[in-house]
Image (tube, rainbow, N blue to C red):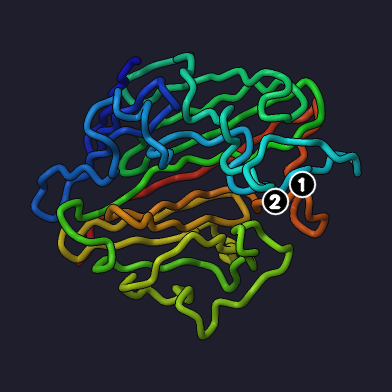
Amino acid sequence: MQTITLENENLKAVFLDYGAVLHQLWVKDKNSIPVNVVMGLESPEDYQNDSWSRGAVIGRFAGRLENPIQIDSKPITIEHSEGVLLHSGSSGWGKKIWDIVTQKPNQVSFRYICTEGASGFPGQVVANIHYRLEKDSLLLEYHAQTNTDTHINLTNHAYFNLNPEGKINTQYLRIHADEVLELKPSLVPTGLKKAVCQTCFDFRTQKQIGETRMDEYFVLSNKSNEAAVLFSSETGIEMITHTDQPGVVVFTPPHFEAICFETQKFSNTPNIKSFPTTLVKKEETYRHNTVFKFRLRT
């Protein structure tokens, strides 16, 4: 297992080739003291036994899928537990060693080749994740190609806390979303959307997270690609998430103080024709860009 450190004048990031994990991300607080805002694990080896996908790249399909999935109206049986596959199951890329393709002081690229039939999905997929520090931002660029038509939906599963010594419920959140996906008891989307208005998931105006706990897919409505803003008054650090994806899963784990912003396409899309497609044809390239930008405010 290899560790890679990137650094510029504002940020320091530490990655692992295991799962292409974002292990640490250091940002200066209002007192110019570096703070690690990623709630990772203590040592690289600990990730091998982690069941919470901390910091990992999730593929080949992030989120929840019902078995079987559809490709050109043909049912494809996939790995599942009680009818649902979460984050690609046993073949998930967060538990694989990625090749380091390029490495520079402010950027690193990882590559993983997923074999035909992994978790039941057709096609071999060659995936690349490119991490880059640019001024006050961490940029994530995903690319993937397949040798046959298949569904692809990637994300990063880093957990953030802008005041690591404190509780996440004291931090302030804004999400540019008027709707969330309606979920079944299995947490698989039904295909319908629900308005956030007059619900605990209405973060259109920034407010404290408080007692709200989430594992929700927010349908983004902001045309500027700004998805969410998280702010800690204790450290003065603000994190702005930008993405070209149609939505973001916001997840607050039940047993540690953190929050995820899993930018991605809709879960269960292969089974819901009304959702924006996740099908990648063999002559196409999957592309996905997300930026975590940091700044200080009072």
Which residue sits at x=60%, y=71%? 179
User: Which residue is farthest front?
Assistant: 82
- Mark 2–mark 1 CB contact (< 8 Å): yes
Which residue sits at x=21%, y=42%? 36
Closest to the observer, 283 or 8: 283
For residue 104, side relative to residue 93 (left or right):
left
Residue 143, picture quadrant: top right
For residue 234, side relative to residue 85 (left or right):
left
Q: Secondary structure at mark 1?
A: helix
Q: Secondary structure at mark 2?
A: loop
For residue 129, side relative to residue 145 (left or right):
left
**Amino acid beneath label 2:** Asn
Residue 48, picture quadrant: top left
Report how far apart the C-alphas of labels 2 and 1 lie in the structure.
6 Å
Please say if 149 is above or below 180: above
User: Which residue is farthest right?
Assistant: 73
Residue 196 in the image: state x and y as whole percent.
55, 77
Which residue sits at x=72%, y=20%? 116
Query: Which quarter shows the N terminus?
Result: top left
**Amino acid beneath label 1:** Pro
Query: Which quarter shows the C terminus?
Result: bottom left
**Label 2: how many Cα within 10 Å (few below 14, some 14–19, many 20+):** many
Q: Mark on residue 268?
A: 2
Please say if 263 is above or below 112: below
Residue 112 in the image: state x and y as whole percent.
56, 19
**Label 1: how many Cα within 10 Å (few below 14, some 14–19, many 20+):** many
Location of mark 1 (residue): 270
Q: Mark on residue 183?
A: none
Closest to the observer, 252 or 187: 187
Marker count (numbered): 2
